[in-house]
Amino acid sequence: MASAIKIDGLTKKYIDVWQKQEVVAVNSLNLEVAEGEIFGFLGRNGAGKTTTIKMLLGLIFPTSGDATILGQPMGDNNVKQSLAYLPEETYFYDSMTGWDLIDFYGQLFKIPQPERSRRVQQCLEKVRLQPDAWKRAVRGYSKGMRQRIGIAQALINDPKLLFLDEPTSGLDPIAHAELRDIVASLKDEGKTVFLSSHQLADVELICSRIAIIHKGKLLTTGTIKELVEGERTEIVAQGSALQNGVFAKLQSVSSTATKEGDNRVRLISSSVEEINAIIDLVRGAQGQVISMVPQKRTLEDVFVETVRREDGDI
């Protein structure tokens, strides 16, 4: 399958004028996104996600490295006709109506009439913005309505590749679910979506593959199935000796061991060998295993474990 995005050693450094030191926002990033997939780009605040997107769009220049977008060099003006971008913080001409705003973006792409009006209506309907809001000023729109109009403007040029930065952030549950479904439907139209989001449950539902970036560095990439496969077992044990000398031994078996009240210890194990070793230690200390509950790994588990491991916390 052809690549929609291919990143080779992309790096962005800048000088923090307050701290008077060099900051590496993106560090030798290598990544490939196939055409027609919804790709999740995950990371904590300040990880380098938005900086990466802006470099790919040609809004800022990399310090080193390169990338191709839809087979063309990064920043190529011709390929921009096939791209769309919804930033995390949207700024619109608030005095315009929803219809006029989308029509304005259609004019920027030089879409002629009557095709432009047809597309404006199609986009507004696709994002499920109520018709009575089409002729209202954007300044009176709610957060959810502004996100809908933002996605509509990203669709007006019928793009092949969309960059969406936190498209469902801060929405009520119904608007959140609807916009998530709208993003998921873009794959059925053959579009590629590069999705930056903190909503890991959404990413797990709609993305085929993901990448985790931390402090500008790519930590892991793969399909959702590959990353979350493998069940874990939560073990709760109790005993007066477990929170003393035995606890260090339990930690050596499972780094997730945590102390709780009433002389209890909680651990997460991912292998039969670990489980047996934990049980042996608990029984050897005259303790009791209170419960053993199988748990399915989630994308949130993968994300937290990956980032903490990089930071040396586990």
Image (cartoon, grey):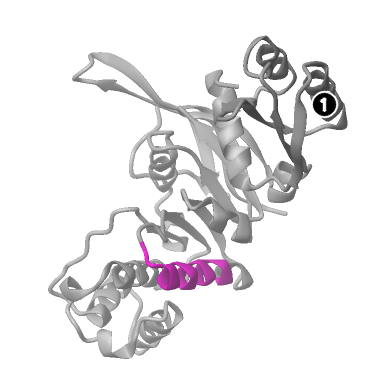
Q: Is residue 219 left or right of residue 81?
A: right
Can you identify the residue that label 1 sits on? 279
For the stretch drawn in magenta, the main secondary structure is: helix
Q: Amino acid at mark 1?
A: Ile
Task: Reply above or below: 246 against 224.
Answer: above
Badge 1 density bin: few <14, some 14–19, many ≥20, Cα 10 Å: some
Identify the element where label 1 is drawn: helix
- In this picture, is 76 found above or below 49? below
* Residue 179 on the magenta segment: yes
- Residue visible at 42% across and 84% down in the picture: 125
Is residue 155 at least partly visible in the picture?
no
Q: Quadrant of the N terminus?
A: bottom right
Q: Residue at x 56, y 50 (%)?
A: 40
Q: Position of residue 300 (x, y in %)?
A: 58, 44
- Residue 222 placement: quadrant: top right
From which residue to which does the magenta span run? 171-185
Residue 117, x across and y down, in percent: 34, 87
- The answer to whether residue 220 is above or below residue 228 is above
